[in-house]
């Protein structure tokens, strides 16, 4: 076998091993969480053997493809189901999208390869890690995912998210993998160096060689083993120590305000288009509303609620601007529920402005005397293609070929809704709709405006198979970790739960469960974090540092 064939074989084997490790790491639970700390090592080792930038780019592309196949296979199944396509087509789409879904592997491989020429192993590790998280920030990844989300498995480590968000944790994880590789290399070097033995010479010569070996061991141990081991230990202990202190502080804090009791309703009804095709539009809406009315009655019997929440698009038509007499009658039923119970309701619906339609969250509040008032939040981040199509590619022939393409218009951004409670208090809520939870800046802006609680409405039914619901929940949970605001999250098919500021989930309804969550939630209005002060700062800062480091290296020239 030729040297090039062996190199290709080794690279592909390392790519597969790394992708398999992160497929298990993506379960975000012990003991698989440990794999994230060493999972990159096989691939990094083969990257260092590649002589050309072209080889590094090819290896990064291969890693992107293997990673999406290992971690995001559920998306291929979801694409096939949503578009009524064969599963094989779904996987073909996933493979073609790999460089778009996971572009950071390609950029990381190239930057790391170039940085080794100018800065050696340690400089390449820093530049590569910075390029990794910087690329994720710059490209705005489709799923908002990053390796740092796996830190959710550790109660203490995840608390460091309020400093640099999930990107900061990713940076730590990538650097730790680099330290492991350097430590392994150092151990191998030391073993080879210690294996040197004098073959001839006088007793004096033997003593001289032995003395030289001892001196070599002392000088070799520092750069080859001690430094990467010390760095790896620091990368674990620093966030761990911070997390322990932060967690104890947060759990020991006396609540600043009295708790509110929320009710979340999950009816396990999805695929509204299919439901309408089977039952007819009117009967489909009737069935959905009846289900949510019945479950809401159950929640109202269990406790005196301050707020009731239904999921995204649970009311699959415009509210307040009915399109028919039947729509007006449905609007009246929802208003009657709120007027009779006296409990504010937040639910997903549509909103319209002329010929533009929006995915919306509606806050319906009792005003007394049988009257109600409502406010609307319009979803800001729309999922590409399924919810909106960019103007440059929106063509009649495309819509004729793919009738499921979205037609919604994005909203203006974050908003805080003032919910008037029965006891006279005002609860300031930041609504999010599904994909909004991917963007930290939406929540940060809302908390800066005074939001005391996050209310996330989602429709996860189109990717309810595999790891999609868990990933979406964990990404949403980081919004609470970063801002230290509680979050109530309700979906139509799961996972619905209450997320406290330290990240724990309370009263969880799993995928395809049908029921309600009734939970006391304490609003927070007086906690600050570095993320709230500086915004989503870590990704651009790390990316800029990588560019500067590489630029200085190019200007200075290759190291000897």
Image: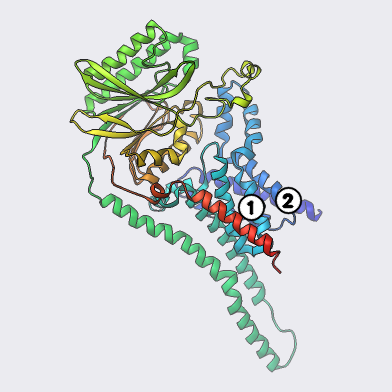
Image coordinates for residue 11, horizontal then vertical, percent? 69, 51
Contact? badges 2 and 1 (CB < 8 Å)? no
| Of the image marks 2 and 1, the number of the one nearer the N terminus | 1
For disc 2, the neighbor class at 10 Å (few under 14, some 14 to 19, many from 20) is some
Quadrant of the snapshot with the C terminus: bottom right
The answer, for residue 399, to whether it is visible in the render is: yes
Image coordinates for residue 105, horizontal then vertical, percent? 62, 47
Q: Which mark is residue 488?
A: none
- At a point 68% along the width and 60% down the height, the residue shown is 554
Residue found at the far right of this picture: 2
Q: Is residue 318 left or right of residue 507?
A: right
Q: Which residue is mark 2?
A: 55
Scheme of colours in the image: rainbow
Q: Which residue is mark 1?
A: 43
Image coordinates for residue 519, horizontal then vertical, percent? 27, 34
Q: Is residue 255 left or right of residue 65?
A: left
Viewer-proximal residue among 47 and 525: 525
Local secondary structure at mark 1:
helix
Q: CA distance from mark 2 to mark 1?
A: 13 Å
Q: Is residue 443 left or right of residue 37?
A: left
**From the viewer's perspective, is residue 330 above or below residue 475?**
above
Residue found at the far front of this picture: 354
Image coordinates for residue 475, horizontal then vertical, percent? 45, 40
- Locate residue 46: give its quadrant: bottom right
- At a point 41% along the width and 16% down the height, the residue shown is 318
**From the viewer's perspective, is residue 94 above or below residue 360?**
below
The answer, for residue 150, to whether it is visible in the render is: no
User: Total marks drawn?
Assistant: 2
Q: Is residue 50 left or right of residue 512?
A: right
- Locate residue 88: give its quadrant: top right
For disc 1, the neighbor class at 10 Å (few under 14, some 14 to 19, many from 20) is many
**From the viewer's perspective, is residue 283 above or below residue 470?**
above
């Amino acid at each position: 076998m030729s040297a090039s064939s062996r190199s290709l074989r080794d690279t592909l084997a390392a790519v597969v091993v790394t992708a398999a490790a992160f497929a298990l790491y993506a379960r975000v639970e012990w003991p698989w969480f440990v794999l994230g700390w060493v999972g990159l090592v096989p691939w990094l080792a083969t990257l260092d053997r590649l002589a050309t930038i072209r080889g590094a780019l090819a290896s990064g592309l291969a890693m992107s493809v293997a990673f999406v196949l290992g971690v995001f296979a559920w998306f291929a199944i979801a694409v096939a189901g949503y578009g009524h396509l064969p599963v094989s087509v779904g996987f073909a789409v996933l493979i073609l999208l790999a460089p778009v879904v996971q572009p950071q592997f390609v950029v990381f491989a190239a930057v790391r390869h170039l940085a080794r020429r100018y800065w050696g192993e340690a400089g390449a590790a820093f530049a590569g890690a910075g390029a990794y998280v910087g690329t994720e920030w710059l490209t705005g990844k489709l799923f908002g995912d990053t390796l740092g989300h796996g830190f959710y498995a550790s109660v203490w480590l995840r608390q460091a998210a309020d400093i640099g968000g999930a990107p900061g944790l990713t940076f730590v994880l990538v650097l730790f993998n680099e330290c492991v590789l350097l430590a392994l290399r150092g151990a191998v070097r030391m073993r080879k160096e210690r294996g040197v033995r004098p073959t001839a010479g006088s007793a004096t010569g033997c003593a001289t060689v032995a003395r030289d070996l001892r001196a070599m061991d002392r000088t070799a141990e520092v750069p080859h083993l001690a430094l990467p081991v010390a760095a790896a230990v620091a990368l674990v202990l620093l966030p761990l120590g911070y997390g322990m202190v932060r967690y104890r502080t947060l759990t020991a804090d006396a609540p600043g305000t009295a708790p509110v009791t929320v009710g979340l309703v999950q009816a396990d009804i999805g695929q509204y288009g299919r439901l309408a095709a089977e039952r007819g539009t009117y009967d489909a809406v009737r069935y959905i509303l009846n289900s949510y009315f019945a479950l809401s009655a159950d929640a109202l019997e269990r406790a005196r609620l301050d707020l009731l929440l239904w999921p995204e698009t649970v009311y699959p038509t415009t509210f307040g601007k009915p399109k028919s007499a039947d729509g007006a009658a449905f609007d009246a039923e929802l208003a009657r529920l709120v007027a009779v119970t006296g409990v504010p309701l937040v639910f997903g619906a549509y909103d319209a402005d002329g010929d533009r339609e929006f995915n919306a969250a509606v806050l319906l509040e009792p005003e007394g005397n049988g009257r109600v008032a409502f406010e609307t939040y319009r979803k800001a981040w729309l999922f590409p293609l399924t919810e909106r199509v960019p103007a440059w590619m929106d063509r009649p022939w495309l819509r004729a070929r793919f009738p499921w393409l979205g037609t919604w218009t994005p909203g203006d951004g974050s908003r805080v809704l003032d919910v008037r409670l029965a006891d006279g208090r005002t609860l300031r809520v930041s609504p999010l709709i599904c994909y909004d939870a991917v963007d930290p800046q939406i929540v940060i802006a809302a908390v800066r405006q005074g939001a005391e609680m996050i209310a996330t409405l989602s429709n996860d039914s189109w990717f309810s198979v595999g790891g999609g619901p868990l990933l979406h929940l964990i990404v949403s949970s980081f919004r609470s970790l970063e801002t230290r605001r509680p979050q109530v999250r309700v979906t139509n098919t799961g996972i619905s739960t209450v997320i406290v500021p330290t990240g724990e989930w309370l009263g969880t309804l799993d995928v395809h469960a049908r029921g309600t969550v009734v939970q006391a939630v304490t609003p927070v209005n007086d906690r600050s974090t570095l993320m709230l002060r500086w915004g989503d700062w870590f990704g651009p800062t790390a990316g800029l540092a990588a560019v500067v480091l590489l630029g200085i290296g190019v200007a200075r020239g290759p190291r000897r």
